[in-house]
Amino acid sequence: MTSPLFTKDTQAVFWNNNKKAIQRMLDYDFIISRVKPSVAAIVHPTGQSSFQKFFFGNHEILIPVYLTTEEAVKNHPQAEVLINFASYRTAYNVTVDALRFDSIKTITITAEGIPERLTRLLNHKARIAGKIIIGPSTVGAIVPGSFKIGNIGGSVDNIIRSKLRGKGCVGLVTKSGGLFNEMCNVISRRTSGIVEGVAIGGDRYPGSSFAEHLIRMDKYPEVKFHVMLGEVGGTSEYKVIEAVQNSNITKPVIAWCIGTSAQYLSSEVQFGHAGAKANAELEQAYAKNNAMREAGIIVPEKFNLLPKVIKDMYAKVLRKKQSDIAEEVEEEVISPLPEDFNEAFKQGRIRKPTNFVCTISDDRGEEAVYAGVPISRVALPDTGYSIGDIISLLWFRKRYPKWATDFLETVLKTVADHGPAVSGAHNARVTARAGKDVVTSLTTGLLTIGPRFGGAIDGAAKYFKYGLDHNFTPREFIAYMKEKGIPIPGIGHRIKSVKNPDLRVSELKRYARENFYDTKLLDYALKVEEKTTAKKGNLILNVDGTIGVLMVDLWKGLKYKDVEINQYIEGGTLNALFVLGRSIGFIGHILDEKRLNMPMYRHDTGDVLYKVSMAEEIK
Ligand code: ACO
Ligand code: LMR
């Protein structure tokens, strides 16, 4: 291989839905002007969706999500890299599974903590399968200007600062991912940057070694020298020495093995990585530094001198006047990566007008609140809050006194049901018998509520209030409504009448008389009723009408202004009481049908007067 591990066309299958890491790859794609997203597919075995949305520059793209690697590979045979972001528990199985796919050439393993026995087995299988493994416990690899794995290189700012967008001359290998970024930074300040970089990972048995990567990079014409950052523990630096001695690595290698302080510490000290522990004298950092120095590798006296050594080497390379080395990396103008909206918003750098205003509840804190009152303070019986209180909080943003919340509850209980024959219950039952679900059947029942059935409450409140506000006598009021051509909402009933009084109405009236400050509008409506029932016995003040006028009396008692009352009435607030209460009954009827498992209902044709004549033909 005489060219870097990845190209601008390289694509990966990303195992695990790690949105941040994937987005970072795609952001990198944007700043290096890639045409194809570097992530072709995501494998997410527990995922629900078949696509995941990401930004590619300033527009969004969908990346397909699969349940298995097999599916992803089958659908994206061009993807050569598997980025294994599985946890240490599954990383082994995911990697072994991926080894069987010809199209996958390189596998990176992020997980830290895979048992060493399994890692060795894995490495063995990978060698047989001819795959390059980077990791475990790695941040990955990068070929600046072409492709990067996951989070390597850090933030976009860091990537730009560290010249990780291309045109470098150094081959870089490290163990650690954090120090990889640090080395990129050091190298970028003294040279034109790196050509390729690999963090082999901090485990004791990495899937690929320093030597393997350096031998490969040595063959790239654009690599002029190498930098290697090893660490205490393990012997892989000795393989590099061997490769230098065997002329498998021919270009200068600058190296340093960190952890030289380990020799001054008591034995058995393990640094951050699983592999960063010297099990023998030759695994000590100072011993490896000495051995490398003796073998002709450029090892500075101390770590602090590494930048200077790199700088000197670059100067030497430049002196050779190698045409493909850029003396000064010209700062190309790149369009800035669009900021993530949520992040920028959180930091207060941008503002946006809201589309909705909510004044009744808030779910942003630790606990959602109803008009400022946390749910836990209203939910249980011992809180003293009733359903009437919850309605007053969420519908009216006030906590009403008990006589008023008791009235709201009385209304709900009163209208909860009126048997199976009323329009809405009938429709709900017919719908349930047609095999429809509870929500649909309930909705059918609710849609029946209107000016004639159950939905006359707002109208009653509106018109009776209008009549009283305008000092109409009952006779004038009836005449006014007649002139308008509107049956008085809240007057009339199909089966209830003077002779067969609606006891629901009697009880509501009794409650109001005993508990309200005043029942002025009720009294007015009853005077109207005297006149209408004089005409016809069923033109009583019905349950809708009674609720409507009493709600106005209630609000007046709570000192609501006329304008507020009118606003609530116009908004349909009072019919909502019927909707809420009657839903209880409709649901009961629907469940009854389901329980009885009655067949589909078809109306008796004998109950229909058919009068169909031949349609007139219009010529
Ligand atoms: N205002 C004035 N006159 C009325 C009203 C009314 N609200 N309702 C009926 N009438 C008159 C009719 O104009 C008709 O007069 P006519 O004989 O001189 O022609 C006569 O009474 C009979 O009318 P119908 O429509 O046959 O009366 P019905 O008993 O069928 O109507 C109904 C009952 C639908 C409730 C009707 O009274 C009405 O529309 N009322 C207003 C709406 C209303 O309040 N609905 C809620 C009912 S309660 C509930 O659903 C929970
Ligand atoms: C009801 O509460 O549904 C009724 O008053 C209507 C009816 O027809 O009985």
Image (cartoon, rainbow, N blue to C red):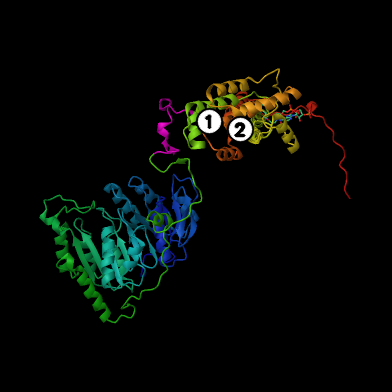
Q: Nearer the viewer, residue 598 or 219?
A: 598
Tell me the mark number nearer the camera, choosing from 1 and 2: 1
Indicate the quadrant of ligand 1 in the picture. top right
Q: Nearer the viewer, residue 495 or 165?
A: 495
Q: Secondary structure at mark 2?
A: helix
Location of residue 361 in the rendering, given as x and y in whole percent from the top left corner: 46, 40
Q: Quadrant of the N terminus?
A: bottom left
Query: Measured along the vertical axis of the image, is residue 615 above or below residue 140?
Result: above
The segment highlighted magenta reads 367-386
Q: Are marks 1 and 2 in contact (CB under 8 Å)?
A: no
Query: Measured along the vertical axis of the image, is residue 533 above or below residue 288?
Result: above
- Find residue 442 and name its label: 2
Which residue type carries mark 2?
Leu
Q: Secondary structure at mark 1?
A: helix
Q: Pick whichever of labels 1 and 2 is earlier in the sequence.
A: 2
Q: Is residue 478 visible?
A: yes
Hey, which quadrant is residue 285 in on the image? bottom left
Is-magenta flag for residue 208? no
Q: Is residue 586 visible?
A: no
Hey, which quadrant is residue 529 in on the image? top right
Query: Measured along the vertical axis of the image, is residue 296 above or below residue 201?
Result: below
At horizontal 55% and vertical 25% (from top left) the residue drawn is 410
Location of residue 236 in the rendering, given as x and y in whole percent from the top left corner: 23, 59
Which residue type carries mark 1?
Gly
Task: From the viewer's perspective, tell me whether residue 235 is left or right of residue 101.
Answer: left
At horizontal 27% and vertical 70% (from top left) the residue drawn is 189
Is-magenta flag for residue 383? yes
Task: From the viewer's perspective, tell me whether residue 490 is left or right of residue 72.
Answer: right
Residue carrying label 1? 557
